[in-house]
Image: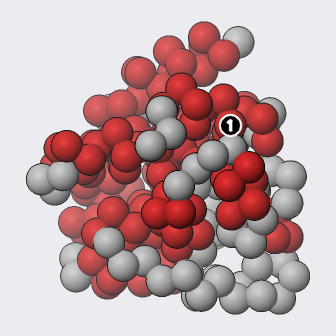
Amino acid sequence: MITREEAYTLLKKYNKDPFHIQHALTVEAVMKWYANELGYVDEAEHWGIVGLLHDIDFELYPEEHCLKAPELLKDGGVSDDIIHSVCSHGYGITVGCGVTIDVEPIHEMEKVLFAADELTGLIWAAALMRPSKSTKDMELKSLKKKYKSKGFAAGCSREVIERGASQLGWELDKLLEMTLQAMAASEDKINAEMVAEG
């Protein structure tokens, strides 16, 4: 399997924007947290690598998101199971060139990625509105209020988040609360990594 270090190098080959790097690190950390929480402790590194690489093609090829990824990942020596997982987070979503992604999330890990990816963006946007600029002092009720406000973080699709919760068989509140906990738990580590990136 590709190592975390190799995966990070591959990510940075195609992604230079600090916003995209931070999103990748956030989803990596959230995926590892979920792996530990849901009883996949031995697979936490694998879950994290899928999270780290999930948007590998987005910065350079936004119109072909999830379509260009297999080629970039294969060139980087990434295994087919990781490629499937990365592409599955676009399931049922039509990308810029009019193609709808048909790679279905099957494993629980893929369903978590599908559900949590958009949500991390919304939670981060909500955190930046707070005096602390942090998720660590955010409560679920405050997040829910932002979530219900249609104009807030309008680019984060509520429909995709709700479909993700439904694929997992979870109430939306459970997904919101767990993803918020995951982000709060990993925020300091991600900030430190971003500082190291310079």
Element carrying mark 1: helix
* Quadrant in the picture for the N terminus: top left
Residue 15 point in image, percent of width and height:
77, 39
Along the viewing direction, whichever of 147 and 117 lies nearer the viewer: 117
Q: Amino acid at mark 1?
A: Leu
Residue 181 point in image, percent of width and height:
27, 44
Are there few (<14), some (14-19), or many (20+) residues within 10 Å of tag 1? many
In the rendered view, tell whether residue 43 sits above or below residue 153: above
Q: Residue at x 17, y 44 (%)?
A: 41
Q: Quadrant of residue 95?
A: bottom right
Q: How is the image coloured?
A: secondary structure
Residue occupying the far left of the picture: 39
Report the side of 36 relative to 6 (left or right): left
Along the viewing direction, whichever of 90 and 189 lies nearer the viewer: 90
Q: Residue at x 48, y 33 (%)?
A: 3
Q: Quadrant of residue 113?
A: bottom left
* Quadrant in the picture for the C terminus: top right
In the rendered view, tell whether residue 122 sits above or below residue 197: below
Query: Can the viewer see residue 131?
Result: no
The residue at which mark 1 appears reads as 10
* Number of numbered discs overlaid on the protein picture: 1
Report the side of 80 relative to 16 (left or right): left
Residue 112 point in image, percent of width and height:
35, 64
Q: Residue at x 59, y 74 (%)?
A: 90
In the rendered view, tell whether residue 122 sits above or below residue 167: above
Report the side of 109 relative to 130 (left or right): left
Query: Can the viewer see residue 45?
Result: yes
Q: Residue at x 69, y 68 (%)?
A: 66
